[in-house]
Image: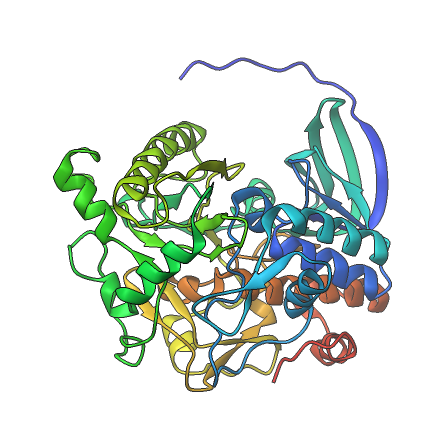
Amino acid sequence: MNTIVEPARSVDVVLETDVLVVGSGPGGLAAALAAARAGAKTALVDRNGCFGGNITQVGVEGFAWYRHENTVDCEGIGIEFEERAKAMGAAMPEPQSLSHALDAEMFKWVADTLVQEAGVTPLLHRLGVAPIVDNGSIRGVITESKAGREAILAKRVIDATGDADIATRAGAPFHKSPKKEMMAVSVMFSMSGVNKRRFIDAVKADPQTYADWSGNGEWDYATTGKEDKLFSPFLRKPFQQALAAGLIPAGLKTIAGTWGTVTDQGDLTYLNLVHVPEIDGTDPSDLTIGEMRGRREAIYALEALRGFMPGCEDAKLRNFGMTLGVRDTRKIDALYNLTGNDVREQGRFEDAIGIFPEFIDGYGILILPTTGRYWQVPYRSLVPKGVGNLLVAGRCIGGDKISHASARNMMCCAVSGQGAGVAAAVSLARNEPFDALNIAAVQKELARQGARFQ
């Protein structure tokens, strides 16, 4: 590969802060709010024009779709996202669980409100491109924007990019599954013009369960059995019919999945139907392929629903998500890497910073938390090896494939985010490094903020 040499240049320092959070998905947004509420001067960077990440930019609205009658759920900022959305008219009851789906568009306003109330400095339209590292410790981040390159200095940095961009560029070790083993990416979309009564009547006439997720080799899931009879808003039959009728190209069997809500106004939202395999979310060439192929397949799905799903005959596309939904890229090599046994057998840790139900969704496994079982999220899984003053939050925390299939879920990302934000503020207040932080002090502040860690 040819290379060029960029000329050296000075970069303006546009902000100095206590805590800098890079990425504003559920993990980053929770981290920024937690750090600010714990008394740290906090700034939140995002590459796009809104906060919320997977919620607002991808359009994943099912924030707690795993929750059932006997679920022991986490507490804290993640639950606050759901409750504030309900209070601000940005949520609707979710059809398969005891939860509310978030309105991706309205949640942009909810996130703005939460950021402003907490006194977090908002830094939208800035892409974090390089860490500033001195003697093995991160001192801030270089961003790129319409203003060019800018430097933001911080005493503590939280990487909530999802892909561990800042941590890996700072030299933190990581691992990543081979592309063929990565979970597929998704293009989310919503429709308008749906006849709600006809659609719901058709769903009731042929109710689908989680057992129906498996069956054609392209979409197979292993459960514990207790999930199999539970209702799922799952759609495959219209796409099988469209495939037979030639509306979908022969061999394209991956179009299947779930819908989120259907409104009285005829909006069918959070259509999680398009799954593009073998896309590496850290490769822009792969991302380009995923975006374009995903939108094409979404149009196939739309035409199939118009042709074979009652109530959708006159429907049209309302919107695509702003960007691909990526489930699986880098995971840091942390002081402790979670295991499949931890999330399947109620792992307990003295340095817990939160809990999450026994919910696993990925790599061909689906386990729903219907028995009250839960695991604890350890602080050490947020601490990358080899780089000082840095934590990660969200789906890039340390762990193996099966633990990732649990920890990657948005509510758990909010749990690790709140833990990271509190830890950053406590680290500053006590002048202690992240790898020798007083966990009791972190847990005390988490309890004050309403988080549950036991």
- Closest to the observer, 418 or 307: 307
* Residue 247 visible in the current orientation: yes
Rendered residue at 50%/47% (across/down): 267
Residue 249 drawn at (x, y percent): 18, 33
Look at the picture and state if 204 lies above or below 304: below
Residue 9 drawn at (x, y percent): 74, 18
Protein image colouring? rainbow
Rendered residue at 72%/81% (across/down): 440
**Label total for image:** 0
The image quadrant where one finds the N terminus is: top left
Report the side of 220 relative to 433 (left or right): left
* Residue 23 visible in the current orientation: no
Rendered residue at 69%/76% (across/down): 451
- Closest to the observer, 14 or 147: 147
Report the side of 31 relative to 314 (left or right): right
Residue 168 drawn at (x, y percent): 54, 44
The image quadrant where one finds the C terminus is: bottom right
Residue 428 drawn at (x, y percent): 82, 62
Rendered residue at 63%/80% (across/down): 453
Report the side of 186 relative to 135 (left or right): left
**Splitting the image into 4 quarters, where does residue 341 fall?**
bottom left
**Splitting the image into 4 quarters, where does residue 81 fall?**
bottom right
